[in-house]
Image (tube, rainbow, N blue to C red):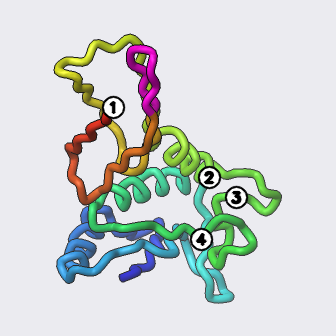
């Protein structure tokens, strides 16, 4: 199921309003991918939507809706297609200007995906209680490198969303 998410600035559906409808879709047992999400303020005489809000308003909408959609366990993905002004059917609706410079919304998306939603852990000289260490992170794949008693252990672990909020990884030390 791929609901499109064209969100108007005025009379816009709140995340709570969307959640009820998305949960109804999820109850059908289908995977949900949010597609073609974009934000608009009005309609042009030519019959297409237009973004006439500020860069800050545009970025705030990305900051509100993208984390909301990513937080729902039944949302399997988000298809983002509104990158460039001039190629987006919503006039001025891209996150990059015609000259390629980023708008505040592009900077917000970059910050979410490349900084806030990344887990970087660098631990040194850690005393492990019972050989265990708790680390908070996001779902996804992680590369690890562990040095112990002059030996290095490397590998990849995966934390799938379906695994729940507390997952355990055992790193073999042999």
Q: Are marks 3 and 2 in contact (CB under 8 Å)?
A: yes
Q: Which sits earlier in the primary sequence, circle 3 or circle 2? A: 3
Question: For the C terminus, which image quadrant?
Answer: top left
Please identify the residue farthest to the front as the structure is shown.
174
Q: Point out the stretch of residues depicted in magenta.
A: 145-153
Q: In the rendered image, which quarter is residue 18 located in?
A: bottom left
Residue 166: image quadrant is top left
Q: Is residue 54 above or below residue 169?
A: below
Residue drawn at the location 79% of the way across and 63% of the way down = 98
Residue 93 image position (x, y, % from top left): 63, 67
Specify few, some or many for label 4: CA neighbours under 10 Å numbering under 14, 14-19, or 20 or more: some
Decide: marks 3, 1 in contact (CB < 8 A)?
A: no
Measure how far apart labels 3 and 2 are at the Cα level. 6 Å
- Nearest to viewer (mark 4 / mark 1): 1
Residue 159: % across, % down: 32, 49
Task: Kindly identify the residue that appears in the image at 17 percent across and 21 percent down.
Answer: 130
Horizontal relation, residue 151 to residue 23: left or right: right
- Reading the image, the residue beneath label 3 is 96
What residue sits right under mark 1 in the picture? 174
Of 108 and 132, nearer the camera is 132
Real-space Cα distance between discs 4 and 1? 46 Å
Q: Which residue is mark 4?
A: 81
Identify the secondary structure beneath mark 2. helix
Q: Position of residue 24 (x, y in %)?
A: 20, 78
Q: Secondary structure at mark 4?
A: loop
**Mark 3 or 4 closer to N-term?**
4
Judging by the rendered image, the residue that carries numbered circle 2 is: 106
| Within-10-Å neighbours for mark 1: few <14, some 14–19, many 20+ | few
Q: Nearer the viewer, mark 1 or mark 2?
A: 1
Q: Is residue 146 left or right of residue 96?
A: left
Q: Quadrant of the N terminus?
A: bottom left
Give the main secondary structure, helix, strand or loop, of the magenta stretch. Answer: strand
């Amino acid at each position: 199921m791929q609901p499109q998410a064209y969100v108007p600035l005025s009379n816009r559906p709140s995340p709570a309003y969307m959640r009820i409808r998305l949960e109804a879709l999820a109850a059908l047992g289908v995977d949900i991918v949010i597609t073609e999400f974009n934000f608009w303020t009005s309609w042009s005489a030519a019959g297409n939507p237009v973004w006439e809000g500020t860069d800050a308003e545009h970025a705030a909408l990305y900051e509100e809706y993208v984390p909301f959609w990513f937080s729902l366990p039944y949302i399997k993905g988000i298809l983002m297609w509104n990158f460039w002004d001039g190629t987006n059917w919503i006039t001025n609706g891209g996150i990059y200007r015609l000259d390629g410079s980023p708008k505040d919304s592009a900077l917000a998306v970059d910050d979410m995906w490349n900084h806030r939603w990344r887990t970087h852990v660098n631990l040194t000289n850690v005393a492990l209680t019972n050989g265990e260490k708790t680390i908070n992170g996001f779902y996804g794949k992680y590369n690890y490198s562990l040095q112990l008693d002059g030996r290095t252990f490397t590998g990849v672990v995966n934390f799938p969303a379906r695994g729940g909020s507390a997952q355990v990884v055992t790193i073999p030390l042999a």
